[in-house]
Image: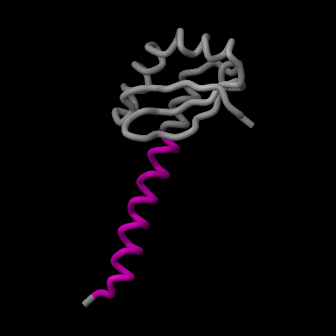
């Protein structure tokens, strides 16, 4: 019979691996959708309950990204169906 510690470690390992692969895919798709100048002013902050959190470096970029939100979200959903919404906020990107 397996030790409970081993079972827990296996489950956590699988969850972590799936999350890492998902985050990598979101990052790759994000880089394909945005232009280079947009990428330099944004940073993916994570995904929770289907909402992708994105930091932008100024109020001007917050406005720009909110204007493009629907276009970006549609393209993201095509590639990563787990993403249901995007939330932008001002924060550190470096």
The dominant secondary structure in magenta is: helix
Q: Is residue 92 magenta?
A: no
Vertical comparison of 65 with 9: above or below: above
Q: Position of residue 17 (x, y in %)?
A: 45, 58
What residue do we see at 61% from left, 11% from top?
A: 64
Q: Is residue 8 magenta?
A: yes
Farthest residue, direction right? 94
Vertical comparison of 76 with 70: above or below: below
Q: Which residues are magenta?
A: 2-25
Query: Which quadrant is the N terminus positioned in?
Result: bottom left
Instruction: Using the image as rendered, state which of residue 16 and residue 78 is in the foreground.
Output: 16
What residue do we see at 40% from left, 26% from top?
A: 85
Farthest residue, direction bottom? 1
Q: Position of residue 71 (x, y in %)?
A: 46, 13
Q: Is residue 40 left or right of residue 64?
A: right
Instruction: Using the image as rendered, state which of residue 15 and residue 66 is in the foreground.
Output: 66
| Residue 94 position by quadrant | top right
Instruction: Using the image as rendered, state which of residue 3 and residue 29 is in the foreground.
Output: 3
What residue do we see at 55% from left, 26% from top?
A: 32
| Residue 14 position by quadrant | bottom left
């Amino acid at each position: 019979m397996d030790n409970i510690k081993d079972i827990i470690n296996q489950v956590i390992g699988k969850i972590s691996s799936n999350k890492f692969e998902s985050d990598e895919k979101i990052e790759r798709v994000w880089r394909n959708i945005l232009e280079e100048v947009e990428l330099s002013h944004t940073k993916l902050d994570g995904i929770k309950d289907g909402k992708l959190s994105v930091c932008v470096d100024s109020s001007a970029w917050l406005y720009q990204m909110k204007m493009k939100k629907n276009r970006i979200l549609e393209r993201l959903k095509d590639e990563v169906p787990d993403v249901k919404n995007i939330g932008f906020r001002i924060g550190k990107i470096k």
